[in-house]
Amino acid sequence: MKHILFYAAICIALSACANPHPQTITRVVTPPSLLMVPVAKPAKPNPKTATQKDIAVFIVEQNAAIDACNARLNILKKWSKNQHGYR
């Protein structure tokens, strides 16, 4: 009987520590503006007049634009994790 009363007292005491209405803090955080600027899209060569060199230059420029976008996405991912406290 002593044990039951002891455990009941502990349960009552611990339940008083619980917060029935946890406070949620919400804040709007915008990403750095430099990361929100669009990456320039390379101009497509004219299919009627384009040479192989024009196509090759287009492919290289397109790959560079994709790499720039991916780099920005990785920076945004790291920034977002830092904002939310994730590691």
Image (cartoon, rainbow, N blue to C red):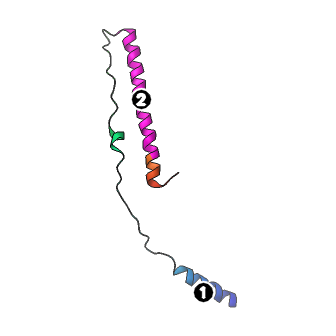
Disc assigned to residue 66: 2
Sort mark 2 into few (<14), some (14-19) or many (20+) by Cα contacts within 10 Å: some
Q: Is residue 19 left or right of residue 29?
A: right
Callout 1 amino acid: Ala
Q: Secondary structure at mark 2?
A: helix
Location of residue 51 (image quadrant): top left
Query: What range is drawn magenta here?
Result: 50-78
Q: Residue shown at 52%/78% (left/top)?
A: 17
Query: First in sequence: mark 1 or mark 2?
Result: 1
Q: Position of residue 8 (x, y in %)?
A: 61, 85
Circle 1 sits on which residue? 9
Looking at the image, how many numbered discs can be counted on the residues? 2
Q: In the image, is residue 13 above or below residue 74?
A: below
In this orientation, which residue lies closer to the viewer: 46 or 79? Answer: 79
Q: Position of residue 53 (x, y in %)?
A: 39, 10
What main secondary structure does the magenta stretch of the protein show?
helix
Q: Residue shown at 64%/84% (left/top)?
A: 7
Q: In the image, is residue 61 above or below residue 48?
A: below
**Quarter placement of the N terminus:** bottom right
* Residue 64 lies in the magenta stretch: yes
Determine if residue 1 is in view: no
Q: Position of residue 57 (x, y in %)?
A: 39, 16
Q: Residue shown at 56%/80% (left/top)?
A: 14
Sort mark 1 into few (<14), some (14-19) or many (20+) by Cα contacts within 10 Å: few
